Image (tube, rainbow, N blue to C red):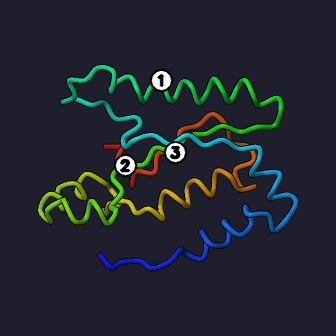
């Protein structure tokens, strides 16, 4: 997989908007909360023996929804981003190619995620394009939760 340098134009564009280039974007960025959680937000951990770990995901979903209900009357949106496997430089260095191929096969889109995929999802949730979205968990998983 070729390495990407710098940020994508969409990421740079939203970053510039959120940094205060317009009054509307400054107000929007102050009214949004995004929770991040580990991969597979809606997939059961079949092989997990750590029961508290299994509870972490449904609890974070519930917490996101409860806080969203609580603060919605003040115009604050609360959402959660749940990425699947994100191929960072660190993971690329430690996961053997054959294991990476197995992990890739689990994702219907046929690839592992990138940090840019997660960043773009978060930028969408803080942008005006998602102004009527609150209390959701956005799975950035390449379709992994469908299988």
Q: Residues within 10 Å of mark 1 (few under 14, many from 20)?
A: few
Q: Residues within 10 Å of mark 2 (few under 14, many from 20)?
A: many
Residue 76 image offset from top left, x and y in percent = 76, 37
| Front residue of 88 and 84 | 88
Say what secondary structure mark 2 lies in. Answer: loop
- Return the mark for residue 81: 3
Count of number-bearing discs: 3
Q: Is residue 26 above or below residue 51?
A: below
CA gap, disc 3 and disc 2 = 10 Å
Residue bearing mark 1: 59
CA gap, disc 1 and disc 3 = 14 Å
Say what secondary structure mark 3 lies in. Answer: strand
Do the CB atoms of the residues marked 1 and 3 lie less than 8 Å apart?
no
Q: Quadrant of residue 39?
A: top left
Residue 47 image offset from top left, x and y in percent = 18, 30
Which residue lies at the image location 76% right of the left edge and 43% below the top edge?
31
Q: Is residue 36 above or below residue 108?
A: above
Residue 5 image offset from top left, x and y in percent = 45, 79
- Dot 1 or dot 3: first in sequence order is 1
| 25 displayed left or right of 111 | right
Which residue lies at the image location 67% right of the left edge and 66% below the top edge?
14
Instruction: Give the residue at the far top of this rendering.
Output: 51
| 125 displayed left or right of 27 | left
Residue 41 image offset from top left, x and y in percent = 41, 37
Say what secondary structure mark 1 lies in. Answer: helix
| Front residue of 8 and 91 | 91
CA gap, disc 2 and disc 1 = 18 Å
Residue bearing mark 2: 84
Do the CB atoms of the residues marked 2 and 1 lie less than 8 Å apart?
no
- Dot 2 or dot 1: first in sequence order is 1
């Amino acid at each position: 997989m070729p390495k990407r340098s710098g940020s994508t134009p969409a990421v740079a564009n939203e970053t510039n908007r959120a940094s205060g280039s317009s009054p509307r974007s400054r107000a929007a960025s102050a009214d949004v909360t995004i929770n991040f959680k580990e991969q597979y937000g809606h997939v059961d951990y079949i092989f997990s023996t750590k029961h508290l770990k299994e509870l972490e995901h449904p609890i974070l979903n519930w917490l996101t929804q409860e806080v969203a209900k609580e603060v919605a009357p003040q115009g604050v949106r609360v959402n959660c981003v749940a990425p699947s496997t994100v191929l960072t430089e660190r993971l690329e260095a430690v996961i053997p190619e054959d294991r990476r191929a197995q992990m890739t096969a689990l994702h219907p889109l046929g690839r592992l995620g990138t940090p840019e995929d997660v960043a773009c999802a978060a930028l969408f949730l803080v942008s005006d394009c998602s102004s009527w979205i609150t209390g959701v968990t956005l799975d950035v998983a390449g379709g992994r939760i469908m299988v």
